[in-house]
Amino acid sequence: MGFLQQNARRAIERLIVNLAGKNGLLTTTREDCMDNGDVIRVTITADASVPEHPLIRIDFTGTAGESSGNINAPLAITRAAVLYCLRCLVDEPVALNAGCLEPVSIIIPEGSLLNPS
């Protein structure tokens, strides 16, 4: 099991290095609106400035507060969606496991659409 997790971690680390590019650092912020106008904002920082330990931060700060309706996504769903997106960006076969998230920091504010109370 350890080998599978190491392999997954290394695949994500290679992705981070590719995203960070020549400068070793990439930061981008994107946002979109739900049908009701609520904003989902994400800032992605791929940091390969320390080549032995590339990291990526996915920060949803600025996302709208939770809704009283049924459009909220529980924390587990949000984390799974991040994992799925990263896995889709990896250009090699890799087992989906906890190793994929080792170099990943996910910030999801409490009380938001993506982490309701």
Image (cartoon, rainbow, N blue to C red):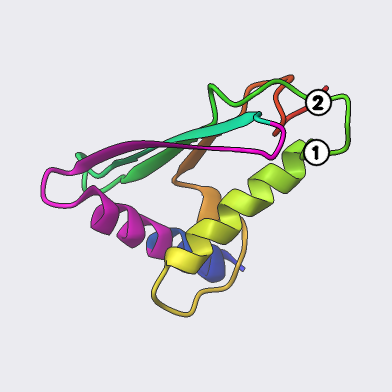
Q: Which residue is mark 2?
A: 67
Residue kind at label 2, given as amino acid type? Ser
Image quadrant where one finds the C terminus: top right
Q: Residue 94: image x %, image y %? A: 51, 74
**Residue interval drawn in magenta:** 11-36
- Residue 63 vs 30, above or below: the answer is above
**Label 2 neighbour load within 10 Å: few <14, some 14-19, many 20+:** some
State yes or no: residue 104 in magenta.
Answer: no
Q: Nearer the viewer, residue 86 or 102?
A: 86
Coordinates of residue 107 in the picture (x, y in percent): 55, 29
Residue drawn at 66 percent across, 38 percent down:
34
Seen as rendered, the residue at the extreme left is: 22
Question: Pointer 1: what residue?
Answer: 71
Residue 26: in magenta span: yes
Q: Quadrant of residue 53?
A: top left
Name the side, left or right, on which 44 lies relative to 75: left
- Do the residues under discs 2 and 1 have CB atoms within 8 angstroms? yes
Question: Residue 71, position in %: x, y?
Answer: 80, 38
Q: Toward which corner of the image does residue 18 lie, by quadrant? A: bottom left
The residue carrying pointer 1 sits among few (fewer than 14), some (14 to 19) or many (20 or more) residues within 10 Å by Cα, namely: few
Q: Residue at x 11, y 50 (%)?
A: 22
Foreground residue among 39 and 97 = 39
Residue at image coords 64%, 52%: 81
Spatial separation of the CA atoms under disc 2 and disc 1? 7 Å
SS state under label 1 = loop
The amino acid beneath tag 1 is Ile
Specify the farthest residue to the right: 69
* 2 horizontally vs 9: left or right: right
Q: In the visual, does 70 lie left or right of 42? A: right
